[in-house]
Image (spheres, rainbow, N blue to C red):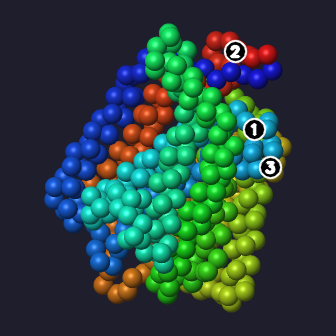
Amino acid sequence: MTHVAQPLGGPLLTRGYRVLLGMAGIALLLIAWRFAAGLGAVTGLNDGYPWGIWIAFDVVTGTALACGGYAMALLVYALSRGEYHPLVRPALLTSALGYSIAGVAIAVDVGRPWFIHRIPLRPDLWNLNSALLEVALCVMAYVIVLWIELAPVFLRRWAAGGETGFTRFARAATRGLNRAMPFIIALGILLPTMHQSSLGTVMVLAGPKLHPLWQTTFLPGLFLVSCIGMGFAMVVVESSLAVLAFGRRPETPMLGRLSRAASITVALFLVFRFGDLAVRGQLGALFAAGRYSLLFWLETILFVLPALMFLRATVRRHLGALFGWSCILALAGALYRFDTYLLAFDPGPGWSYFPAAPEILITLGFVAVEVALYVAIVKRFPILGGPSARSGRVEVTA
């Protein structure tokens, strides 16, 4: 028997939800100011640092943290580990929201957002030598694919209504999507593999402006492997928060097994990274590069500790420990990306960057919107499966 996903129900406009809406409202006002007054009025960006926290966090880090859907697709469909299937739908929702917010952040960050439509619609203007072109096309396509993968969740609810034209359309669309889903899932695995690696390629192009502890032609592979580990970690974090916030019964044994997959991914990342440093003759810089050495070892410690702790059976049996160490692993991946895109990047003398207050508030607003949409969707649509720990009620299928 398998647990049926059910809408959580309950009131939506709680006190906490109003706080989220307030943060989103402040961000919306600041975004309006950004478009009215320009980037210079609301950001700390300059010619040396043409991108800042909106790219480093909202896009580069945010999409990696939203790779839970990608990581679970690899595990469930590519590796045929069907026992993890109950975790797929919540992971897909988190991914869809995270990537959609990243798309909005890009639109806010670019200098002339009214030309964004040219990327998918004007191939005659494409710069085929640009790594960012691949990132843009893949991210746009992946956002669409993620929402298509989630579409049956919404269509099945709408199909359960009366015999209206819209209901019949929802039923027909559900049947069509079920037939096409293997191809959609394949795209859902291919696209993030391409653009997550290309996010590393972008910084390869920075050349000597990026510190040698991070600058390597293997950056695409390191970005790809690390995002998978971050995806596994965020699935554990999301599932744990659902237990705390919504009273779901914890899937601790399943999450414990998933944490071992995260450990394997981290081990691969570290082997590749230290091997690359050895091949390039940069091991000496691990202890002789001042603050850059400190940043490198901080990253490494944050990667190693969760990977080792996930190997302990006592940790894998304790949801709180899984949650805490998964947060640290996600933080490690986030720091690696921040270091690569900002902290270990030096455009030359005379340039500095620190995010302005509006940049920070807009970023917090993006996070608030993502959380608010997640809560609204899981309360109205069947995303979370399993029994409620508060009611003890279990919905099952034969």
Q: Which mark is residue 395?
A: 2
- The secondary element bearing badge 2 is classed as loop
The residue located at (59%, 28%) in the rendering is 174
Dot 3 or dot 1: first in sequence order is 3
Amino acid bearing label 2 = Glu
Could you classify mark 2 by the number of other residues whose Cα lies within 10 Å: few (under 14), some (14-19), or many (20 or more)? some
Dot 2 or dot 1: first in sequence order is 1
Instruction: Report if the CB atoms under discs 3 and 2 are less than 8 Å apart.
Output: no
Q: Residue furthest left?
A: 37
- Residue 179 visible in rendering: yes
Amino acid bearing label 3 = Leu
Q: CA distance from mark 2 to mark 1?
A: 18 Å
Could you classify mark 1 by the number of other residues whose Cα lies within 10 Å: few (under 14), some (14-19), or many (20 or more)? some
Residue 297, compared with residue 191, is above or below; it is below
The residue located at (61%, 33%) in the rendering is 176
Q: Residue furthest top?
A: 162
From the image, state whether disc 3 or disc 1 is nearer to you: 3
Q: CA distance from mark 3 to mark 1?
A: 11 Å
User: Which residue is denoted by mark 3 in the rendering?
Assistant: 79
Task: Name the quarter where the C terminus is drawn.
Answer: top right
The residue located at (67%, 63%) in the rendering is 225
Dot 3 or dot 2: first in sequence order is 3
- The secondary element bearing badge 1 is classed as helix
**Depth check, front residue: 131 or 337:** 131
| Residue 180 left/right relative to 158 | right
User: Which residue is denoted by mark 1 in the rendering?
Assistant: 84
